Amino acid sequence: MTDAALDRRRLESVKVAVGITFATNGLAYAGWLARAPAVREDLGLSSAGLGLLLLCISVAAIATIPLAGPLVQRFGPARAVLLGSMSVVFGLVGMAGGTLTGSVPLAGAGLVLLGMGNSTWDVAMNVEGADVERRLGRTLMPRFHAGFSLGTVAGAGVSAAAAAAGVAVSTQLFLTAILAAVVMILTVRRFLPHTPVTAEQRSTGRVRDAWREPRTLLIGVIMLGFGFTEGAANDWLAIGLVDGYHATETIGAIGFGFFVTAMTLARLFGGHAIERWGRVTVLRGTAASALLGLLLVVSGISVPFVLLGALLWGAGASLGFPIGMSAAADDPLRAAIRVSVAGSIGYGAFLAGPPLIGLLAEHLGVLRALLVVLVAIGLGLAASGAARPLALGRPAEDEPATRP
């Protein structure tokens, strides 16, 4: 077997490892979030109290993302993923201990570790995924993010089964922590070897410099717009069906299922579209799909139109984040820093989105409040040109239709 064949075989193995990493991240994240009602009950909190507690993970995640880039750049994605995943593991253990003993401070500390670890884990696995994507010459990032989506579906399924079987949430969290720890310790060993950057390279790839790069900031705006579009549906689509259309909770869950299914399928097969038409064209097409889906959801016509809208909305929200991650990582020497900066902007959507829509819903109703997503879609669409691949260190004049 030739050296080239061996290298490609090794890269295919790394690709599988990255996919497992994304899926495990989704499983660990959704495994506790799906049992939020049980967490609330065990801690004796009101819904408002739980909302304040959940701010621990959001604030910790946003604060840590800018630090994750330098960490990945210095120690490599494998060590950064291991560090981040172990922080998530200890966070799950803290959450388990908090729910077992009824200690809100312990649960809050666990959520802080979850937020910090998840940000580091997220940036590092995206940097590794972009590196594999670039070396193989194929568009893989949407599939990696589909792995995350499938992990969240699996986590939600495990949570539903555990709740139905009467398994305590603390027990489930302990078991999830053990599973995540074992899987990630074994998986990161298959990552690509890290080549330390020189002092000169570090000096040209500083965080403060990336914050001054218009392209990096615009990529962050793409991720912000599409992230808000995705997060709004995650948090409010089912509620919109129940409150706006007087549907049952079952129909609300089905509507959310339509959205998640469409998003996952679009991520699984979206790479082919990106290779054929390029990042910018695909971003603009998905923005149009999200816009049409949103308008159907808020139209007030009937539930079947909402379900169709959920499919279009899910497909439309699916590719903004993975395309943004690939675009931020175009230059391998500055990938970690740029991913962390763009991610800092993008993840602001998940911090600001839920309370903003909730506040508007109090005064306007859920369906009208969801119209704020139009602004997010517009932002992602307006900034879409920044996703053009870099060529020779500069944005390409014409985007290739075949490779990221």
Image (cartoon, rainbow, N blue to C red):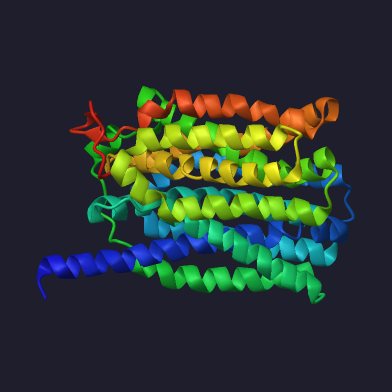
Quadrant of res 404: top left
* Apparent side of residue 250 relative to residue 388 in the rendered image (left or right): right
Q: Residue at x 38, y 55 (%)?
A: 77
Residue toward you, 77 or 371: 371
Quadrant of res 180: bottom right
| Rendered location of residue 331, percent (x, y) | 27, 39
Please state, as top left, top right, bottom left or bottom right, where the N terminus lies in the image: bottom left
Residue toward you, 238 or 170: 238
* Apparent side of residue 329 relative to residue 353 in the rendered image (left or right): left
> Visible in this render: residue 100?
yes
4 to 127, vertically: above or below = below
* Apparent side of residue 87 relative to residue 299 in the rendered image (left or right): left
Number of numbered markers: 0
| Rendered location of residue 235, percent (x, y) | 70, 44
Q: Residue at x 32, y 38 (%)?
A: 278
| Rendered location of residue 263, percent (x, y) | 54, 50
* Apparent side of residue 165 relative to residue 56 in the rendered image (left or right): right
Q: Residue at x 40, y 59 (%)?
A: 79
Q: Residue at x 69, y 60 (%)?
A: 32
107 to 166, vertically: above or below = above
Outermost residue toward the left in this view: 2
| Rendered location of residue 329, percent (x, y) | 34, 42
> Visible in this render: residue 125?
no
